[in-house]
Amino acid sequence: MRRSELFLLLPLLVGLAGCATRNPEGAPPVPQATVPSPPQEASQPFFSEEGLASWYGNTHDGKTTADGEGFDQSALTGAHRSLPFNTNVRVTNLKSGKTVIVRINDRGPFVKGRIIDLSAAAAATLGLAENGIDNVRVDAFAADQTRRQAVRSN
């Protein structure tokens, strides 16, 4: 090979060597760029409200709720004035940050300034049982509507 041919071949080889990927054994892999999808939890609620929550328990246990089922103080349920029955809502205690998902199965509360009445079990999960009432946020998310039963969180 002539010297001029080597001179032209050398930059080509250097360029090809720079394009090669080599991951020596024991070296950490080169991270690949990915675009994360937004978490489902970050979606916006289709309903949100803040105010006072109260709870009702053993004096109502077994009585018929507005949707026709028997009230069970140990179930995670709630009463709301306007949300459709069987809507699952996340109720968050604004002081403690504790959250519970309840299913709306009754109408109420009928006390001015309150936005939701909770079963004894839901109130205990949020820490409302001690005070009787507390400030909460009620959010309804589309993703929660596929749940068959209300479940506790936190």
Image (tube, helix red, strand yellow):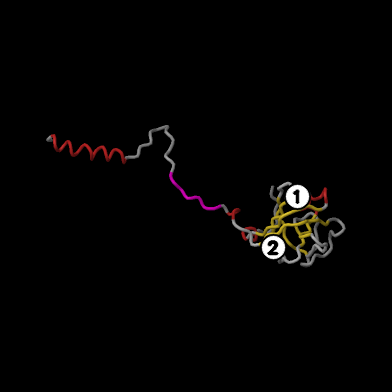
For the residues bearing labels 2 and 1, Cβ distance under 8 angstroms: no
Task: Report the residue at 78% width, 65% height from top.
Answer: 107
Most prominent secondary structure in the magenta stretch? loop
- Rendered location of residue 38, percent (x, y): 54, 53
Left or right: residue 49 compared with residue 10: right
The residue at the far right in this view is 59
Q: Is residue 37 magenta?
A: yes
Q: Secondary structure at mark 2?
A: loop
Q: Is residue 27 magenta?
A: no
Instruction: Identify the mark nearer the N-term, 2 or 1.
Output: 2
Q: Which residues are magenta?
A: 32-38
**Residue marked by disc 2:** 87
Amino acid, disc 1: Leu
- Rendered location of residue 30, percent (x, y): 42, 39
Q: Is residue 25 above or below residue 67?
A: above
Q: Along the line of sight, which residue is nearer the eye, 117 or 133? A: 133
- Rendered location of residue 36, percent (x, y): 50, 50
Task: Report the residue at 76% width, 53% height from top.
Answer: 135
Q: Is residue 31 above or below residue 139?
A: above
Q: Along the line of sight, which residue is nearer the eye, 90 or 25? A: 90
Amino acid, disc 2: Thr
Q: Dot 2: few (<14), some (14–19), or many (≥20) neighbours within 10 Å?
A: many
**Residue marked by disc 1:** 126
Q: Is residue 10 above or below residue 75?
A: above
Q: Along the line of sight, which residue is nearer the eye, 122 or 4? A: 4
Q: Count how many numbered circles sit on residues in the image.
A: 2
- The image's mark for residue 52 is none
Left or right: residue 131 compared with residue 36: right
Q: Secondary structure at mark 1?
A: helix
